[in-house]
Amino acid sequence: MLWKIEELNNISHSKPDIVEHALDKLLNDNPDIKRAVVVNAYLDKKINLSKAAEELGLNRLELERQFESEGIPVRRLTDEDIRAEVKAVKKWE
């Protein structure tokens, strides 16, 4: 199985749209796998709680509550995170 993942990664350099489409289909057709991927990305600090919630179709507070009930550590927003969020929202206005 690992070789398949490695080859998808290789193909993603020349044909990113094809690989992205395949991964989106896999994750959308398998919500348990999608959640596991998102939670692992969050735990590995590759995405923040807001992005994890967005990927799972939840709001940040809903996901925070789920994580707390499941014993998944919740990273709290730092002052820097809050400033970045405010800056991003202002760009959208």
Image (tube, helix red, strand yellow):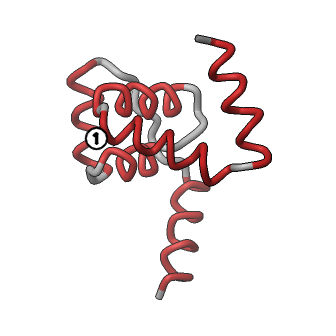
Image quarter of residue 4? top right
Q: Foreground residue, 41 or 84?
A: 41
Q: What residue appears at the point 56 percent right and 47 percent down from the top-left corner?
A: 20
Where in the figure is residue 28, as x and y percent of width and height? Answer: 34, 42
Q: Is 73 on the left or on the right of 66, as rendered?
A: right
Q: Amino acid at mark 1?
A: Leu
Q: Give the mark count.
A: 1
Where in the figure is residue 48, as x and y percent of width and height? Answer: 50, 44
Q: Farthest top residue?
A: 1
Image quarter of residue 27? top left
Q: Farthest bottom residue?
A: 93
Q: Is residue 90 above or below residue 87?
A: below
Q: Is 26 on the left or on the right of 57, as rendered?
A: right
Q: What residue appears at the point 53 percent right and 31 percent down from the top-left corner?
A: 41
Q: Is residue 6 above or below residue 74?
A: above
Q: Quadrant of the N terminus?
A: top right
Q: What residue appears at the point 42 percent right and 51 percent down from the top-left corner?
A: 50
Q: Which residue is mark 1?
A: 63
Which secondary structure, mark 1?
helix
Image quarter of residue 62? top left
Q: Is residue 85 above or below residue 68?
A: below
Local crowd at mark 1 within 10 Å, few (<14), some, or many (≥20)?
Answer: some
Where in the figure is residue 70, as x and y percent of width and height? Answer: 25, 20
Q: Foreground residue, 50 or 37?
A: 37
Q: What residue appears at the point 51 percent right and 49 percent down from the top-left corner?
A: 21
